[in-house]
Image (cartoon, rainbow, N blue to C red):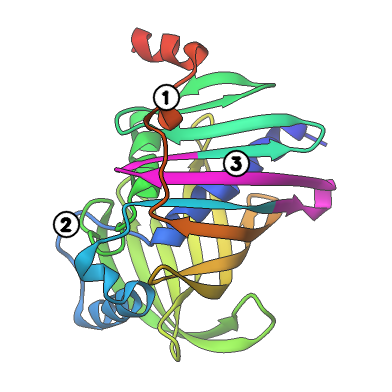
Amino acid sequence: MNWNGNKKSVVAAVVVLAGILVGHASAKDKIDPKAKKVWDRSIEVTYGKIAKTRSIKSMKITGDMAVPMAGMTATFEMLQQDGKFKTDVDIKSMGKMTECYDGKHAWSFSELQGPAVKSDKETLQSMQQADLYATIDWKKYYDSIQYVDDETIDNGAGKKVKVHVVALKSKATGKEDKAYFDADTGRQIRLDAQILIPGGTMVPSTTLIWDYRNVSGIQIPFRSKQTVGPMTQEITIKEAKANVDIPADSFKAPDEVQKLIDKK
């Protein structure tokens, strides 16, 4: 078993989850009428009044992760504030891993793999993950949003549902992602994407998300199941709090990472 590869997959699961929790975004004003209708409804049911007030300034999320095939379990904490994010993953018997975007640089650090500073494309992906209002400000991270079709898929909780499918042209990867929205509720319940994981490798990812709950006026999915390459991770949020006080130094790079940043 390639434990280093599994560690990367686990971090990728949380990193992508951050983007799912706050939505997705785009770069040129290219959105067809059908896609806009689906997209706008998703914003309405996810953010409600918060879409206009943007009164949520920070978010703290904690939870559990598991990779059943590898017999691996972990806990995580994710912080988002002022266009920054950090995810700390504590893998039992394997140590801690950190993924961070500090507003300028994207980096990672783990006890086994050491420090790394991300490429420009990985940094763009991290910027999206840090953006609490990425769905609303969709012109930053994708080239287009186009309606594809209606389908019937599993909603993650074992129920077949009708969905509206839209294609998202990712600026970070240059690839086309697909987002699936429940036709009844308007909520996003699946994302198929090409993602950049630590080291710059691009891998396919399919994420199912469900169990939406109200957190200070926005809807957040507390359960997800994500396949990254050959690995499947299960993610359960235990607690989500909005507008928490996050110390300014929470996003500060450790000395090992800062040395790499200074060399760029």
Q: Which residue corresponds to mark 2?
A: 28
Q: Which mark is first along the chain, 1 or 2?
A: 2
Left or right of residue 90, residue 194 in this image: left
User: Which residue is nearer to you in this view: 132 or 150?
Assistant: 132
- Assign the magenta stretch its main secondary structure: strand
Residue 95 in the image: above or below residue 256? below
Q: Secondary structure at mark 3?
A: helix
Question: What percent of the width, then of the height, locates residue 245?
Answer: 41, 44
Q: Which mark is first along the chain, 3 or 1?
A: 3
Residue 137 in the image: above or below residue 256? below
User: Which residue is nearer to you in this view: 8 or 51?
Assistant: 51
**Residue at the image point whose x is 26% and y is 77% from the top:** 40
Residues shaded magenta: 65-86
Based on the picture, tell me whether residue 51 belongs to the magenta stretch. Answer: no
Q: Which residue corresponds to mark 1?
A: 252
Q: Which residue corresponds to mark 3?
A: 11
Left or right of residue 228, residue 167 in this image: left
Quadrant where the C terminus lies? Answer: top left
Based on the picture, tell me whether residue 85 belongs to the magenta stretch. Answer: yes
Distance from disc 2 to disc 1, alpha carbons, whole Å, reads 32 Å
Q: Secondary structure at mark 1?
A: loop
Neighbours of disc 3 within 10 Å: few (<14), some (14-19), many (20+): many
Question: What percent of the width, then of the height, locates residue 253?
Answer: 44, 21
Question: What percent of the width, then of the height, locates residue 106?
Answer: 40, 30
